[in-house]
Image (tube, rainbow, N blue to C red):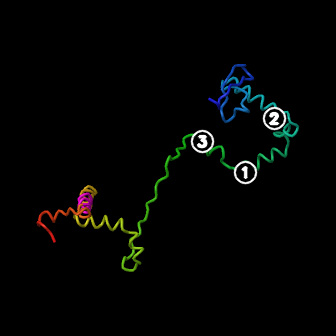
Amino acid sequence: MANRRTSKCRCCGELFQADVRNRGRQKYCSKPACRRAGKAARQRRWLGKPGNRDYFRGPEHVERVRMWRAAHAGYWRSHGRGQTLALQDALARQVIEPPEDLSTRALQDALRLQGPVLIGLIAHLSDSALQDDIAITTRRLLQLGQDILAGRSADASQAGAGP
């Protein structure tokens, strides 16, 4: 692969494939001993800088840590064991608002409701609110409409020759 390239581990000296996200910076392989050596080297390098030598020492740093702990009370307890986090939040019930009176609405607004109106009409014609019955009636009405548009009316064949 073009994104993969091998590097030589600074600890064990073996070749390894660096993670594509860190290929320019990763100097140690993923073996536990090499990871520990890399952590120690980074720590030594950080502590070797003059501004970081006394970062954890002195009364001002003790006070800094004390203030941080007061501002983040319970930080170490909030990630404790035994806490179960829900994978999904409980869904709140949705309130369905009753539809407005169609006689007070403009025709354009009423036409936007044609899907529910059509389903209601089919349910009324089939005298059933079950999906299966509505689907059967819909297929029958669709076929009848296509026959009428094509000039093949089912009633015309029963009544003989029409005008």
* Magenta segment includes 139: yes
Identified by mark 2, the residue type is Trp
* Quadrant assignment for the N terminus: top right
Q: For this rendering, which residue is in front, 8 or 76? A: 8
Q: Residue furthest bottom?
A: 104
Neighbourhood count class around disc 2 (C-alpha, 10 Å): few under 14, some 14–19, many 20 upward: few
Under circle 3, the secondary element is: loop
Distance from Cα at disc 1 to Cα at disc 2: 27 Å
Q: Which residue type does callout 1 highlight?
A: Ala
Q: Which SS class for mark 2?
A: helix
Residue 82 bears which disc, if any? none
What is the three-letter code of the residue carrying label 3?
Gly
Q: Earlier in the sequence, mark 3 or mark 1?
A: 1
The magenta-colored residue range is 138-146
Residue marked by disc 2: 46
Labels 1 and 2: the sequence-earlier one = 2
For the residues labelled 3 and 1, the Cα–Cα distance comes to 19 Å
Which disc is residue 80 wearing?
Answer: 3
Within the image, what quadrant is residue 114 found in?
bottom left
The nearer-to-camera label among 1 and 2 is: 2
Residue 70, position in %: x, y?
Answer: 72, 51
Pointer 1: what residue?
Answer: 70
